[in-house]
Image (cartoon, grey):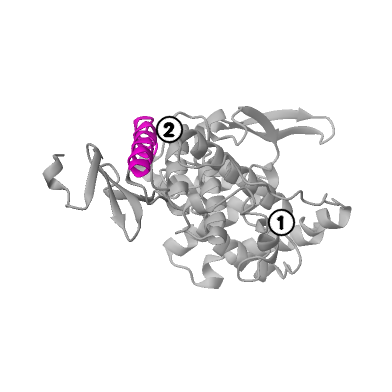
Amino acid sequence: MRRQEFGEDEIAIYDGAVIYLRGEHWQFRMWLPGEKKYARRSLNTRHQGTAIERGRDLYLDIMARLRQGKRYFSINAKQAAERYLAHRQRDVAAGLIVPGRLATMRAHLNHWQDFVGRDTRLSELDRGSCEDYHRSRLLGARGVAARQVTIANEQSTINAMMLWLFRQGDSRIDGFDFPRMPRLDRNDEAVRRSTFEAEEVVAFGHAVERWCDRVANRLDEDEWRQRSLAGHYFLISAATGLRTGEQLQLRWSDVRWLRHHSRRHGGDVELVEIRVRAETSKVRTSRRFFCRDGGLLRAWEAIALACLGDAASQEALVFSLDGLHAMSKRALHYHFGKLMDLAGVSREGRNLVATR
């Protein structure tokens, strides 16, 4: 940039950077093409020679930062979360984490953005800025309080993001100093409140039968299939103990039936062998297990094959009507609520959920 492009009261100190008087004090201004903004700062001096020296030092500091791939202007909380999630999306593509884990991270960082404010600049935050995060989450949004284990996981995700942003040069801190949380008393009563009682399991099974009764409920074909899918999903979940992500990604090639001679039962019994693939496992390790499901998978297989028709294959998803798209978690929560009401199971003060 040539000298004559600057105003009469401006002094060029380097290409693209000037100092100028505002009132009695000298100021610094530099255009940043990558960020399409001017970097402006007061030089806190009335002396021209000192202003030139400080302006040159500031220019060199800014250029060193830009050459390292760092930004001069701080990004906001929303941009920070988006960048980190885009970074972790590559881990999904590489098979390092499952898509469900990324969705959980997104939920964690949404809560953090709600707390600090989506437009808040990272430069405005310090290590103590999230001191009240735990208290805020316990109070809960819309009256729904978060569990302490959930808050601990959220804080871990937040600090993992901040460390990555720090290493990328987007944050001046590498994490927040979250206060130490009180120890949890994991008593039997808390476990009981998060578990179905024996009679509730029976009531839930009867509720599924009534919910899926095509004649009594006057269901058309589409609604009957949707309800059958949800009902079999929940009953098979209870029989196998599969995690939500594992069950929704289960393929028919992962399921095998075999006969086992049991002295206890006085003859052969049918067992189901289920293979959980490493890429669908939360802990990224494969496993196999055997269980008796009372013929639930056989019954659902007959319905699923009829839905798939010519598209039926061993690579089709088990809990799907088209073999390609698994039942959504939103649909699972909807049917779970209906079945809980139908079964007369109270969820007040209890952590009974459709997915885990």
Horizontal arrangement in the rendering, residue 349 relative to residue 39 (left or right) = right
Asked if the stretch drawn in magenta spans residue 333, the answer is no
Residue located beneath label 1 in the image? 147
Placement of the N terminus among the 4 image quadrants: top left
Looking at the image, which residue is at 35% across and 58% down?
A: 24
What x and y, as percent, mark residue 191? 81, 53
Asked if the stretch drawn in magenta spans residue 56, the answer is yes
Between residue 157 and residue 220, name the one nearer to us. 157
Q: Magenta residues, as a range?
A: 49-70
Residue located beneath label 2 in the image? 93
Between residue 238 and residue 167, name the one nearer to us. 167
Question: Label 2 is placed on what type of residue?
Answer: Ala
Horizontal arrangement in the rendering, residue 1 relative to residue 184 (left or right) = left
What x and y, as percent, mark residue 321? 44, 50
Query: What number of labels is visible?
Result: 2
Which SS does the magenta portion mostly show?
helix
Label 1 packing within 10 angstroms: few (<14), some (14-19), many (20+): few
Quarter-of-image position of residue 310? top left
Between residue 157 and residue 217, name the one nearer to us. 157
Q: Residue furthest left?
A: 4
Looking at the image, which residue is at 34% across and 34% down?
A: 63
Between discs 2 and 1, the one toward the N terminus: 2
**Which of pointers 2 and 1 indicates the residue nearer the eye?**
1
